[in-house]
Amino acid sequence: MKVYGLIGYPLSHSFSKGFFAEKFAREGIKECMYESFPIPAIEELPALIAQHPDLQGLNVTIPYKQAVMSYVDELSPAAAQIRAVNCIRFKDGRRIGYNTDAIGFRRSLEPLLRSHHDKALVLGTGGAAKAVQYVLESLNIPYKLVSRQAGADTIAYEQLDANMMASHTLIINTTPLGMYPNVDTAPALPYELLTDKHLLYDLVYNPAVTAFLQKGADKGATIKNGHEMLILQAEASWEIWNER
């Protein structure tokens, strides 16, 4: 039996196990199983790997996409540039880190982009934000990072004025704000400045419409959650795990 799985903490929000269970059933894949492995600390990963000698691949979610890099032997070029890993392939005794978030995000975002979506705000600075930055750079879309506190490369939410909101019509939430079960939380944007020119993309997919997305929809903005991105990055993981 080939074992695949997901590490992160907590994992109550994750659809990955259900997704792969359905995929295996639909495609008649009988020799594979996919498990959730909630580990409270990344230091528990070696013990987890030792307990599952049939492990072929792992997905990695919040909060370990950057910390897990210390536990792989090699990085794909994209993962090395992004500095975050959300997919690990076990091959010939080695652990190879990849980033399929970037693949899923780009394939999901591109059909929604219009000519006026030429500047972006990226909310959050974690591992998922790194993949978003990588994609925006590859699409030649300049962006600003937004966080609770201003820093060398970030601006604070309270610095988002009318001009900034009007010129940055693509807004991507990479934080867990609004994720189940804390569905009433949302990034501290000046939502009253949103218009029908804005595109709000939330990497959160549970619930389907977060408070962030609902506030955008109320102003006529185009909205998109992270569910399609999840499917596309999961399929990309499967491709990586099964490459010859």
Image (tube, rainbow, N blue to C red):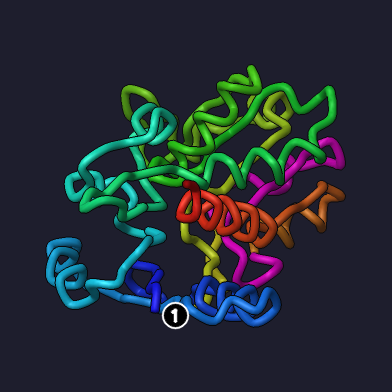
Q: Is residue 205 magenta?
A: yes
> Which residue sits at x=52%, y=68%?
179
Q: At numbered mark 1, what does the secondary structure look like: helix, strand or loop? A: loop
**x, y percent for residue 141:** 64, 21
Specify whether residue 25 is in view.
yes
Q: Quadrant of the N terminus?
A: bottom left
* Residue situated in front as seen by the camera: 97 or 216: 97
Image: magenta residue range: 187-210
Specify whether residue 61 is in view.
no
Q: Is residue 40 left or right of residue 145?
A: left
> Which residue sits at x=73%, y=40%?
193
Q: Residues within 10 Å of mark 1 (few under 14, many from 20)?
A: few
Q: Quadrant of residue 59?
A: bottom left
The answer to whether residue 92 is above or below residue 41 is above
Q: Is residue 163 magenta?
A: no
The answer to whether residue 185 is above or below residue 97 is below
Residue designated by label 1: 12
Identified by mark 1, the residue type is Ser
**x, y percent for residue 54:** 29, 72
Q: Quadrant of residue 196?
A: top right
